[in-house]
Image (tube, helix red, strand yellow):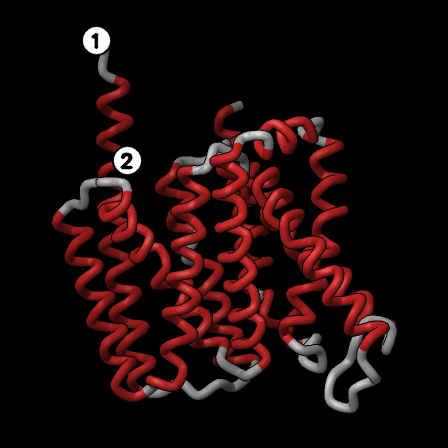
Amino acid sequence: MIKTDGHLGFMQALIACIFWGTMPIYFKLLQSVDPLEVVAHRIVWSVPVLLIILYFRKNLASLGIALANSSVRSAMLVSALLIAANWLIYVGAVHSNHILAASLGYFISPLISVFMGRIFLGEKLSRSKWVAIAIATAGVSVLAVQALDTLWISLALAISWSSYGLVRKVADIGPITGLTAETGILFVPFMLFLLWLTFGMPPSPTTQHLGDELTIDLLLIGGAFVTAIPLLLFASAVKKMSLSAIGLLNYLAPTIQFLVGVFLYDEALTPSHMVCFILIWTSLAIFSTDSIVTERRRQAAMAKPV
């Protein structure tokens, strides 16, 4: 039974990572829509979808309980702003043909998360993890020399996502419930923004809006499902898999994004990009190996009879 659960968890996490990895293709289809409007629709349509998911999971009460706590509400406000900023930068990067820069950001993010854990949570770092962080820093420095114009995209995505992860780690709320709270907090301002665009602004010759074309309408609404489905799968997989396995699969999504950018959209892969990615992948290999060894030691220690 445990083995079956492990296989099911792996398949769920794999599908979630493929969803995230191929997401640039989805947002490329919305290139005629302003990135801020895309994010607004993603947030607004996610709220009813997530509420329905919570209802069928018999978990609606958890949303009210969590938001009744003032510290959780404050954390959700901060995480809502961070996730909105992250989504906006990401969609903007895809629309401006900088998928490689976006993928690099999500490669760097786990290493920044570890560094943040050391600073803000007092988590100890092994020598191997310090080496991994140093190699990743060297990789980013190489890219800064020749690709300074897009480096800010990578760093902004990495820092916003890592900061989001830090806030969610300390907030006492589950992944689906938390995303529902975050999108719920942002629902009113973004709904007002969309109403203003629809009824208060004249038609634009440069960008499309909801109601201009059926395909665009379906894609804008579908952003809610693109958001909710992989999160639901991944949240379920986490309960069935080891942390080390989950950690390794986290690198699959940016790897797929990297391949999509290079081979599907012909983004330029410069020598500085290659050196940077090689150093980042090397640092992630060291980081992952150290994490796996640490996890196995922890499990072995727990298995020993007292």
Q: Assign the C terminus to one quadrant of the image.
A: top left
Amino acid of disc 2: Glu
Q: Position of residue 142 (x, y in %)?
A: 24, 80
Q: Is residue 240 left or right of residue 26?
A: left
Q: Is residue 234 left or right of residue 209?
A: left
Label located before the other in sequence (2 or 1): 2
Which quadrant would residue 140 be assigned to in this image? Answer: bottom left
Which quadrant would residue 94 be assigned to in this image? Answer: bottom right
Residue in the image at 49% along x and 66% along y: 256
Q: Which residue is mark 1?
A: 306
Q: Position of residue 150 (x, y in %)?
A: 40, 82
Q: Is residue 62 left or right of residue 147?
A: right
Which quadrant would residue 300 be assigned to in this image? Answer: top left
Examine the rendering and report whether any part of residue 215 can be seen: no
Q: Which residue is mark 2?
A: 295
Residue in the image at 46% along x and 37% along y: 171
